[in-house]
Each structure stands twice: as C-alpha cells, then as structure tokens.
C-alpha cells in the first residue's frame, strides 16, 4: 500500500461494462516527507475520496480486484491500484507530513 494525494478525477461515458459504477481518480504518490515521487496514476476509488484528499492506495492487483467485486456476468474487474481508505493524517519520525486533518500535537 502507498500514501497518495488525489489530484483529479476521470469522467468516461464509454468504458468497459465492468467499470460501470466505479469511480476513477488521478493520484500522485507521496514520499515520507510529503513530496511526490512517481508519475501520476489513474486508480479506482472504493473509499469515496475527493480531490485534495490524502488516501491509502492498494497497489496489489489481486486485492484491488477483491475490493471492486464482480460485474453482472460474475467476472472480477481487473485493476492494478485502488483507493481503499481516506487518511486522517500521516507522521514520519514524529513529525506531521500530510493529511486531511492535523493532529492535536502537531
């Protein structure tokens, strides 16, 4: 799993039928100091994240498929990465790094 910031969403009216009902977001992954460290990526969202949220992204395709479930034909959606949680805040070496709230002692 990796920590990322949601920077955008993807709107698609024509897509694979297995993708219907699933939200797609654009994320940038964060280092322990809060800086970005990888190209942006499109991921599924099962945690109802919003642009600007710090999120936890499952980068295991098998687990992502379990989060997304099966389509109407009983087939699992194939996915590499899925937002599986919205992070309150992160710390590293006791210092606040990033988050949607600020800890009381930061």
Image (cartoon, grey):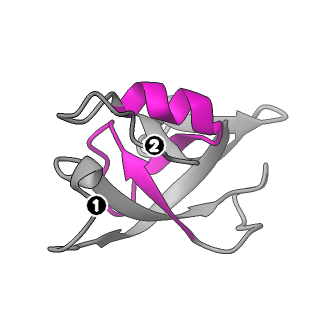
Q: Tell me the number on the disc at residue 45.
A: none
Residue at the limit of the structure toward the right, as seen here:
93
In the rendered image, residue 23, in percent from the top left (x then y), is placed at 26, 53
What is the secondary structure assignment of the residue under circle 1? loop
Residue 45 on the magenta segment: yes
Please indicate, yes or no, whether residue 15 appears anywhere in the rendered image.
yes
Q: What residue does disc 1 label?
A: 16
- Residue at point 67% right, 43% down? 2
Q: Left or right of 91: which side holds 47?
A: left
In the rendered image, residue 1, in percent from the top left (x then y), is placed at 67, 36
Q: Is residue 49 above or below residue 62?
A: below
- Residue at point 33% right, 28% down? 69
Q: Is residue 14 above or below residue 58?
A: below
- Residue at point 64% right, 42% down? 59
Q: Left or right of 58: which side holds 43?
A: left
Q: Left or right of 82: which side holds 9?
A: left
Q: What is the C-alpha distance between the residues marked 1 and 2?
A: 19 Å
What is the secondary structure assignment of the residue under circle 2? strand
Q: Residues within 10 Å of mark 1 (few under 14, many from 20)?
A: few
The front one of 82 and 100 is 82
The front one of 24 and 86 is 24
Q: Residues within 10 Å of mark 2 (few under 14, many from 20)?
A: many
Q: Between tags 1 and 2, which lies in front?
A: 1
Q: What residue does disc 2 label?
A: 83
Please indicate, yes or no, whether residue 99 appears anywhere in the rendered image.
no
Please identify the quadrant where the C terminus is shown. Answer: top right
Q: Which residues are magenta?
A: 41-68
- Residue at point 14% right, 74% down? 13
In the rendered image, residue 89, in percent from the top left (x then y), is placed at 53, 37
Q: Is residue 26 above or below residue 43?
A: below
Image quadrant of residue 74? Answer: top left
Residue 54 on the magenta segment: yes
């Amino acid at each position: 799993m990796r920590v990322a910031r949601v920077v955008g969403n993807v709107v698609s009216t024509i897509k694979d039928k297995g993708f219907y009902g699933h939200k797609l977001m654009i994320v940038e992954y964060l280092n322990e100091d809060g800086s970005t460290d990888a190209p942006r990526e499109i991921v599924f969202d099962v945690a109802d994240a919003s642009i600007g949220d710090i999120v936890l992204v499952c980068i295991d395709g098998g687990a992502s498929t379990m989060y997304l479930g099966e389509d109407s034909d009983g087939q699992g959606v194939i996915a590499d990465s899925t937002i599986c949680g919205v992070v309150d805040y992160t710390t590293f070496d006791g210092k606040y790094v990033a988050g949607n709230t600020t800890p009381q002692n930061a």
